[in-house]
Amino acid sequence: MDAAIRGWTRDDVPAIGALWVDALGDTGLHGVGLHADAPGRLRSWLLDQVRERSVVGLVAEVDGRVGGFLLGRVGEWDSIPPITRPGRVGLVDVVCVAAELRGRGVGSRLAAEAVGKMEAAGAERIETTYDPGNPAAARLWERMGFRPSLRRAWRPGGP
């Protein structure tokens, strides 16, 4: 299995969407359910993103198909309230690898390529979020030199 890492195109959107919806359906993340038309909404959003110059979109092509992807962006960041020095930041929004390819370095290769592109675009720092209940994700980012800085917490609302 050899994964070719390349930039994404409009033609990759259906495969990326299917892989992402499948992965989200597996997580049960924080009790959040998928919208009834999640695939259609995601497809529309992805088609908008593929045109954005600030977006870093990568796919791992394995045996002629999309076996994983990474989406991120690079842009100017200013705090709210604006009290810290603004800077150019790379954000890795999502890394997703097909279940049968996990543990084979595909996610690491996607992440390394994205970090390189973000640094080349002038990112002063690169950030990501991942589920702390996913030890493979934690290992991937720790191996790449990422360190936790904040912990996001949630609780269900209501009575």
Image (cartoon, rainbow, N blue to C red):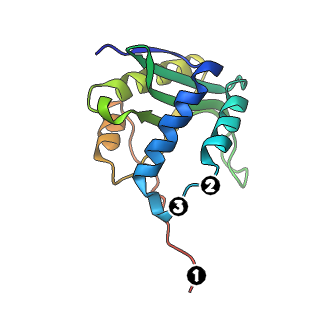
SS class, disc 2: loop
Tell whether 104 sits left or right of 62.
left
Q: Mark 2 against mark 1, which lies toward the viewer? A: 2
Residue nearest the viewer, comparing 126 with 87 = 126
Q: Amino acid at mark 1?
A: Gly
Q: Are marks 2 and 1 in contact (CB under 8 Å)?
A: no
Q: Badge 3 is on which residue?
A: 32
Residue 103 sits in which quadrant? top left
Cα separation between marks 3 and 1: 14 Å
Cα separation between marks 2 and 1: 23 Å
Residue 72 sits in which quadrant? top right
Residue at position x 71%, y 22% from top? 53
Q: Badge 1 is on which residue?
A: 158
Q: Amino acid at mark 3?
A: Val
Picture coordinates of residue 71, whole percent (x, y): 55, 31
Q: Are marks 3 and 2 in contact (CB under 8 Å)?
A: no
Picture coordinates of residue 74, whole percent (x, y): 63, 29
- Residue 156 visible? The answer is yes
Q: Badge 2 is on which residue?
A: 36
Q: Amino acid at mark 2?
A: Ala
Picture coordinates of residue 38, whole percent (x, y): 61, 48
SS class, disc 1: loop
Q: Sequence-wise, which precedes: disc 3 or disc 1?
A: 3
Image quarter hosting the N terminus: top left
Residue at position x 46%, y 62% from top? 30
Q: How many marks?
A: 3
Cα separation between marks 3 and 2: 12 Å
